[in-house]
Image (tube, helix red, strand yellow):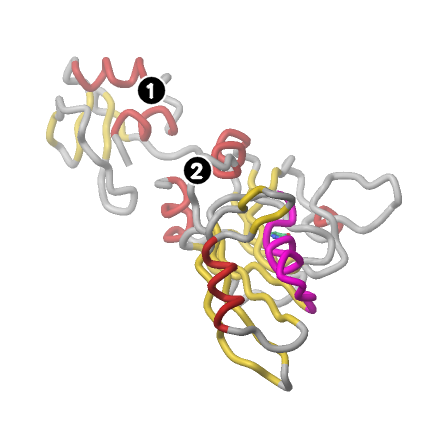
Amino acid sequence: MRINKYLALCGVASRRKSEEYVLNGKVSVNGKIINSLATDINLKNDKVELEGKQLSLPSNYVYYKLNKPKGYLCTAKDDRARKTIYDIVKTNERLFSIGRLDYDTEGLIILTNDGDLAHKISHPSHEIEKEYIAKIEGNLLESELAVLRAGVVENGVRMPKARVELIDTVNGDARISVIIHEGQNRQVRRMFEAIGKTIKMLKRVRIGQIKLSGLKRGEFKKLNDYELYSLLGE
Ligand code: URA
């Protein structure tokens, strides 16, 4: 992560002002004064000091990953009194979700009270990979895979390209891995609808480098350091 971004995250000052600190020789990395704004900080190993005072990322931010079960909304409230993910993750912090999942979709959600990060990572311009496993009714032909990969056309508009691989076929139903960058509303479901396929199960298994693996349905836990660093560095 660039030094000015790191300093700003530590609450030192804005990125711009942080650059001035660097250029004025007030910042050291592992004991050496640095003057270059191109300095990259390794969040795991580097010791960064401002005028001799060691910096650290603020600890009042929390970051969780949740395995959202099907049948839960990602909104804070629902006028039809349906269950939401905040019925599962009950904490004192005001949490934002990074990338929503629709009611019928299960899998990985990241929750944080770091509103800036949630906003930034959720933004479509931020090309973070999201991987889904879709189970569809029936088989999928190679020609249909090719259509999904190229971007299906919906109402005359081409949807974004996707990385799509057939995993296997169990009892006649195909399981497919779908990797997308954008977060258009119901994007994966709409892709399969466009080729006339019915989704039986849709699960998000990865956001960037953060994986769902190890979390049971309805379970949540704090991101580990590796996961957190990968997210902050995105
Ligand atoms: N695509 C969908 O169709 N649904 C989701 O919840 C996420 C991606």
Give the percent coordinates (x, y) of residue 151: 50, 52
Side (left or right) of 22 relative to 123: left
Q: Quadrant of residue 91?
A: top right
Which amino acid, by three-letter code, is at mark 2?
His
Q: Between label 2 and label 1, give the one nearer the viewer.
A: 2
Decide: few, some or many residues near mark 1? Use Cα within 10 Å; few <14, some 14-19, many ≥20: some
Residue 11 lies, with reference to residue 196, above or below; the image says above
Looking at the picture, tell me which residue is in the foreground, 129 or 93.
129
In the image, the segment drawn in magenta is: 185-200
> Residue pushed farthest right?
80
Q: Residue furthest left?
A: 32
Whether residues under marks 2 and 1 lie with C-beta atoms below 8 angstroms apart, the answer is no
Residue at coordinates 51% horizontally, 79% vertically from top-left?
168
In the rendered structure, which amino acid carries the disc numbered 1? Arg
Rounded to the nearest angstrom, the CA distance separating label 2 from label 1 is 19 Å
Q: Is residue 89 visible?
A: yes
Q: Report if residue 207 is visible in the image.
A: no
**Picture coordinates of residue 193, whole percent (x, y):** 67, 58
Between 121 and 222, the one nearer to me in the picture: 121
Residue wearing tag 2: 126
